[in-house]
């Protein structure tokens, strides 16, 4: 494997990256701050689900991987011959040592504690001795591996609420289920008749496979598979779609039931409260790294 390293100004990072991937045969492209760990380091932030305010840093290090050195040399030569790429600088063309990429990737995912006895554990790890409930989940195509604060907060709420409510979780809806992790977590605490729905076919496939792997039962399908009311409804998406879905999600919460919403930033709390106020009063019940968990209780 050969790494091509280029230095590109902010205004042409996107063009360089697109050309490397689309036209010049790069296997992958990554962009980093060329001034990282110096006084000139520049933070670049974007809202979840929204484009970054800038496509790169003032000086971006663009790294592209190629199968062979001749391919990397040809790509660099063709790219830097373009009029629009005159300010792009070639830094290096370097062979990378062989690595066990599967093992390297797996090493980045370790068991995640939800409570002292409730854990999410990748298949290649042994569950901790204290774990009495375990979700076996590997990184895959669909969002939701338990490493994100929104997922952890939903699962923690499930674990804390189960002692008093699990007997009544005779129907559960996980709306925007992704990997199915919230539905699986509910099942481990005794929930039955679980519907996990998503607009992404890959998520539906993932949820079914993960449920089978964890030996729990759920029905995964498109959103139109959700019907009637449920004592418990999860939706871990993002604030904008959650606002649009307010009437739909509230219509699925049965009398006395709970609506658990995540994917919301602290500053968006009032927006969500307002959007749901005609049906259910939401309250912030947890916060983690700038994200909040909002829960509503249907009167009745």
Image: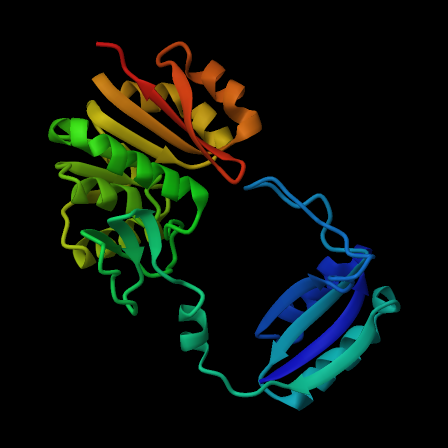
Quarter occupied by residue 38: bottom right
Front one among 245 and 60: 60
Residue 170, position as x, y percentages in the image: 12, 30
Left or right placement of residue 149 versus residue 157 in this view: right
Q: Residue at x 22, y 39 (%)?
A: 186
- Residue 116 visible somewhere in the drawing: yes
Front one among 248 and 237: 237
Front one among 293 and 219: 293
- Residue 23 visible somewhere in the drawing: no
Quarter occupied by residue 13: bottom right
Residue 117, position as x, y percentages in the image: 24, 49
Quarter occupied by residue 86: bottom right
Q: In the rendered image, which quarter contains the C terminus? A: top left
Left or right placement of residue 234 versus residue 47 in this view: left
Q: Residue at x 84, y 76 (%)?
A: 81
Residue 297, position as x, y percentages in the image: 29, 17
């Amino acid at each position: 494997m050969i790494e091509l390293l280029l230095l590109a100004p902010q205004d042409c990072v996107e063009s360089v990256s697109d050309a490397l991937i689309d036209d010049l045969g790069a296997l992958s492209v990554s962009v980093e701050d060329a001034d990282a760990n110096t006084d000139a380091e520049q933070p670049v932030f974007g809202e979840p689900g929204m484009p970054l305010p800038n496509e790169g840093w003032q000086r971006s290090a663009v790294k592209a991987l190629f199968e062979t050195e001749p391919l990397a040399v040809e790509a660099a030569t063709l790219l830097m011959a373009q009029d629009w790429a005159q300010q792009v600088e070639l830094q290096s063309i370097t062979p990378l040592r062989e690595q066990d990429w599967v093992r390297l990737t797996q090493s980045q995912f370790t068991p995640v504690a939800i409570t002292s006895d409730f854990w999410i554990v990748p298949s290649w790890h042994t569950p901790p001795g204290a774990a009495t409930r375990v979700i076996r989940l590997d990184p895959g195509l669909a969002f939701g591996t338990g490493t994100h604060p929104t997922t952890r907060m939903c699962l923690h709420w499930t674990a804390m609420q189960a002692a008093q409510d699990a007997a009544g979780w005779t129907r559960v809806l996980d709306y925007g289920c992704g990997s199915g992790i919230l539905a699986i977590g509910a099942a481990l605490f005794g929930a039955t008749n679980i519907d996990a729905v998503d607009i992404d076919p890959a998520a539906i496939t993932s949820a079914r496979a993960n449920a089978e792997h964890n030996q729990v039962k759920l029905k995964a399908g498109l959103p139109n598979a959700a019907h009637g009311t449920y004592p418990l409804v999860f939706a871990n998406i993002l604030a904008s779609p959650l606002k649009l879905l307010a009437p739909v999600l509230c219509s699925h919460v049965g009398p006395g039931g709970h609506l658990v919403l995540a994917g919301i930033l602290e500053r968006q709390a009032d927006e969500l409260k307002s959007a749901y106020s005609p049906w259910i009063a939401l309250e912030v019940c947890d916060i983690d790294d700038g994200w909040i968990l909002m829960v509503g209780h249907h009167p009745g």
